[in-house]
Image (cartoon, rainbow, N blue to C red):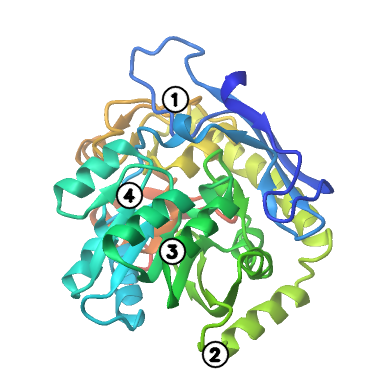
Amino acid sequence: MQEIVRRADRCRVCGRDDWLDVVSFGETPLAGDFLPPDAPPGAERRAPLEVAVCRGCRLMSLRHVVDPEALFGHYRYVSSESDLIMNHMRRLVADAGLDAGDLVVEFGSNTGVHLELFRRAGMRVVGVDPARNLAEIANGRGVETVAEPFTATVGARVAARHGRAAMVLGRQCFAHIHDVHEVLDGVNAVLDPAGVLAVEVPYLVELLASDEFDTIFHEHLSYFSLGTLRTLFGMHGLRVVDVRTAPVHGGSIVVYAAPRASARDERPAVARMLAREDELGLSGDGPYLEFARRTETARAEIGDLVRSLAAEGRTVAGYGAPAKGSTLLNACGLTSEHVRFCTDTTALKQGRLMPGSRVPIVAPEEGLARRPDYFLLLAWNYADEIIGRERAYLEAGGRFIVPVPRPRVVSAPSAVAAP
């Protein structure tokens, strides 16, 4: 692994080398390395999983970077088509204010699900994604997708072929990218002077407030506040003009930025969010050290609960096999001895093993047929939707364990269906 892992000594945003160490999970399996069932012991690729905060721009970041080809060359995360995510994507399309024929370029476009919604609304679309297997799926559904990382060269090539973009979009991928400056050079190469960049990222404030320690894994290099993004965008002649919250992936923000000379006005939401970040003390060390303390408590509580249930002869299974689930299982010391299996709707994961914990992954129908006593809700970011959908399991006596921010057990009497 050493040849594909390197330590990031300097902040990827501001370039400083002044760090506050926050959390270390030690040598951890790559969260996307779902193993074949006959994989020998030690087959997992591992890398240090350590989090620190830059004392310059206050970027929270992993201290080690794994080669993107190892993480994304053949990617098993497929954009969710849950009601929550699809409704969110439809709102982004409706709120974009674009005209028919406008060009939308999305980097990290995955299988093209979101771009397809823009296309149905009358826009021209181009995707850019380094995962060759996902780009192939997108192209197969008619969404033109370039199977490369998004760079200034790629941006210029798209502009030469299709013209300038009214919107450049990056949803839930910007935090995965080490050379964020190169990506923003790509944005400037293709964005129209009157256009807008929209970047969606998990919000640092929500991560800290809700103790979302399991969202820390090797793909998630950066954990952004609005203040840090404003600093970064400003380095590339872009100014933040709007920000909106989104109830996805544990709490996210969509940040809109435009070229500095653009006529777009800054919306009041920007100043409000920046003021809130100042009130929370994000420019100091306190919030990060408190998060580290609570993370250790949560890891112990989750692990102790699941191990005690297994010791009593209760069957515990994982609901969902997301990358965050890999972090949670490994960080809490849970294995297939404690969690019998995980269910997941992604066919690319079924029949494989969770890395490190070696928990087998099965289709949801098979998992429900086995009737475990408890489902550990690894995909807790869809908790309301899942619990509302699985009323029959709860009514039959099953229970969910929602692990974050603190483990709680949900039974039929206490369940509240998603609205």
Which mark identifies residue 248? Answer: 3
Q: Is residue 132 left or right of residue 380?
A: left
Q: Amino acid at mark 3?
A: Val
Residue with the mark numbered 4: 110
Q: Going from the N terminus, do you reach mark 4 or mark 2 first?
A: 4
- The image position of residue 361, as x and y in percent, is 32, 31
168 in relation to 290, above or below? below
Q: Going from the N terminus, do you reach mark 3 or mark 2 first?
A: 3
Q: Name which residue lies at 51% across and 61% down.
A: 201
Alpha carbon separation for disc pair 4 and 1 = 30 Å
Residue 161: quadrant of the picture = bottom left
Residue with the mark numbered 1: 336
Alpha carbon separation for disc pair 3 and 1 = 29 Å
* Crowdedness near tag 1: few (<14), some (14–19) or many (≥20) residues, C-alpha within 10 Å: some
Alpha carbon separation for disc pair 1 and 2 = 54 Å
Q: Secondary structure at mark 4?
A: loop
325 in relation to 246, above or below? above
Which one is nearer the viewer's eye here, 320 or 217? 217
Q: Is residue 97 left or right of residue 13?
A: left
302 in relation to 380, above or below? above
